[in-house]
Image (spheres, grey):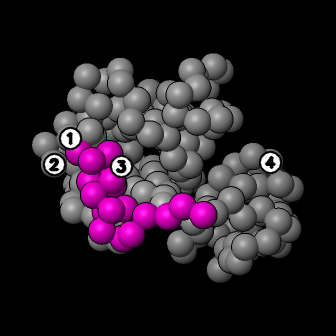
Amino acid sequence: MGSLANAQRSRSADAVTARCNNGKIRAYSGTPPANANTALSGQTLLAELSFGATAFGAASSGVATANAITPDSSADVTGSPSFIRVFESDGSTVVFDMLAACAWQASTAYAVGDRVVNGSNQYRCTTGGASASSGGPTGTGGSISDGTVTWAWEGAKEAEVTPPAGAKQIVQFGQVSMSSLTYTQGG
């Protein structure tokens, strides 16, 4: 059983996140690729955001949190993000992929495949319907009821994309920002 000490996980995370300095974050809809080496095929680019000169703060226990991210002031198309792909400053060298979603909203229609974040977790809609008037999905199960929607837990929140005020998804020509992005080095 191999594992890294926390100090080594932090060094590894710092090395990976340094590759993101002045890099790009591209939010896509569609099925997330198997891994960051998999070529994109059929996914739709929704928005492109930018990291600053120092993309992430120093990692602690293998976890690095992104510094301020420059929003995309005019999204490419309307859609719900399912993942982000992070690129080095050249805009073509992939650093990593992460699941991504917009925040859960009350009394909102959701379709099968829609993803949301609620609290510190991310969920995927398995039965479409209208969300409850408050609360949202919680827990780690595969059949979580929320109004008439059923959600499946996908894991801890990795990246939360913020669409224009009042929208449940990215809206073409609208501003898109990211309210959180955390990189965790396994080990």
Look at the numbered discs 1 and 2 and tell me whether their residues touch, using CB distance below 8 Å: yes
Q: Marks 4 and 1: which is nearer the front?
A: 1
For numbered disc 4, what is the local secondary structure?
A: loop
- Chain part drawn in magenta: 1-18
Q: CA distance from mark 4 to mark 3?
A: 24 Å
Left or right: 78 in relation to 112: left
Look at the numbered discs 2 and 3 and tell me whether their residues touch, using CB distance below 8 Å: no
Disc number at residue 112?
A: 4
Query: Looking at the picture, which amino acid does disc 2 mark?
Result: Thr
Query: Looking at the picture, which amino acid does disc 4 mark?
Result: Val
Left or right: 59 in relation to 121: left
**Pointer 1 or 2: first along the chain:** 1
Query: Looking at the picture, which amino acid does disc 1 mark?
Result: Asn
Q: Position of residue 61 (x, y in %)?
A: 35, 71
Q: Residue furthest front?
A: 1
Q: Main secondary structure of the magenta part?
A: helix
Disc number at residue 21?
A: 1
Q: Residue furthest left?
A: 53
Q: Characterize the local packing of mark 4: few (<14), some (14-19) or many (20 or more) Cα atoms within 10 angstroms.
A: some
Q: Marks 2 and 4: which is nearer the front?
A: 2
Q: Nearer the viewer, residue 67 or 61?
A: 61
Q: Marks 2 and 3: which is nearer the front?
A: 2
Which residue is pictured at 64% across the width and 69% down the height? 106
